[in-house]
């Protein structure tokens, strides 16, 4: 692993655990065992570092999800496995980080967020179309509209306070399932329930609904 990747992965872990504002460049240099000067030689500011963390982890997440999708037999299996993928990530994320990340003002990060949202929405749209073809999702769903609603960050602002009190995992799982169970045919609901029960039995130490 390169020094740059080491810095990014360490910074990501600290941001997620403590929150963005609570982590200084001094904290990072101390944790990494390098001088602050060395840190600034690679990243001109904490904002730039945060932006690179977002990009790096977005690319890693996309690789993971691509591999996950290749292993799944149908759209519902993808939906359920994606849910648990994110629930496992969220186990180590402080709700403070989730709230702070929505208010980042650094231009590079804002541009990244906009592109990431569009990619997420298109992925959801394609997944729902596949689900309709497979008979798991109702064919009268407006996939363009629903993908924008589910994939948008706007809803997250309204849930910020709830995440603080109820936990990010619990809120995400509830909202995620409400959307997809609500769109599913009876066949789709039965498949969702089957896969969740299977996941619970084979992952005793993993967050369950």
Image (spheres, rainbow, N blue to C red):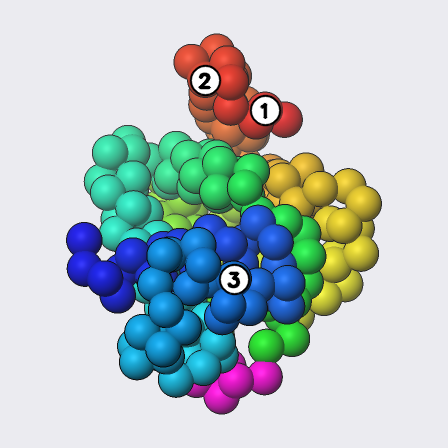
Residue 27: image tag: 3
Residue 204: x percent and y percent? 50, 14
Residue bounds of the magenta highlight: 105-112
Quadrant of the rendered image containing residue 20: bottom right
Which circle marks residue 203 in the picture? 2
Please name the predominant secondary structure of the magenta segment in the image: helix
**Kind of element beneath mark 3:** helix
Give the residue drawn at x 43%, y 39%.
Answer: 85
Report if the CB atoms under discs 2 and 3 are less than 8 Å apart.
no
Seen in the picture, residue 45 relative to 79 is either above or below; the reply is below
Q: Are marks 1 and 2 in contact (CB under 8 Å)?
A: yes
At label 2, counting other C-alpha atoms closer than 10 Å, the crowd grade (few under 14, some 14-19, many 20 or more) is few
Closer to us: 188 or 6: 6
Looking at marks 1 and 3 on the same chain, the residue that comes earlier in the sequence is marked by: 3
Give the residue at mark 1.
208
Residue that appears at 48% across and 76% down: 46
Q: Is residue 171 left or right of residue 92?
A: right
Between the residue at mark 2 and the residue at mark 3, the CA separation in whole angstroms equals: 35 Å
Placement of the C terminus among the 4 image quadrants:
top right
Q: Dot 1: few (<14), some (14–19), or many (≥20) neighbours within 10 Å? A: some
Is 197 colored magenta in this rendering? no
Report, in whole angstroms, how far the alpha carbon at label 1 lies from the one at label 2. Answer: 9 Å
Q: Depth-wise, is mark 1 or mark 3 nearer the camera?
A: 3
x and y percent of residue 67 in the render? 24, 43
């Amino acid at each position: 692993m390169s020094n740059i990747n080491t810095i990014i992965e360490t910074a990501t872990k600290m941001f997620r655990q403590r929150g963005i504002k609570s982590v200084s460049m001094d904290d990072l240099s101390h944790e990494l065992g390098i001088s602050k000067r060395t840190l600034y030689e690679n990243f001109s500011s904490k904002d730039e570092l945060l932006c690179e963390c977002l990009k790096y982890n977005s690319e890693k997440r996309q690789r993971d999800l691509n591999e996950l999708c290749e292993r799944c037999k149908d759209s519902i299996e993808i939906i359920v496995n994606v849910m648990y993928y994110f629930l496992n990530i969220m186990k180590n994320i402080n709700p403070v980080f989730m709230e702070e990340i929505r208010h980042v003002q650094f231009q590079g990060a804002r541009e990244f967020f906009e592109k990431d949202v569009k990619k997420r929405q298109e992925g959801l749209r394609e997944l729902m179309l596949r689900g309709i073809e497979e008979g798991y999702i109702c064919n009268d769903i407006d996939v363009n509209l629903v993908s924008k609603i589910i994939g948008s960050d706007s809803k997250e602002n309204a849930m910020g306070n709830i995440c603080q009190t109820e936990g990010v995992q619990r809120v995400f799982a509830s909202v995620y399932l409400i959307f997809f169970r609500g769109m599913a045919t009876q066949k789709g609901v039965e498949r969702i329930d089957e896969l969740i029960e299977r996941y619970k039995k084979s992952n005793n130490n993993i967050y369950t609904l």
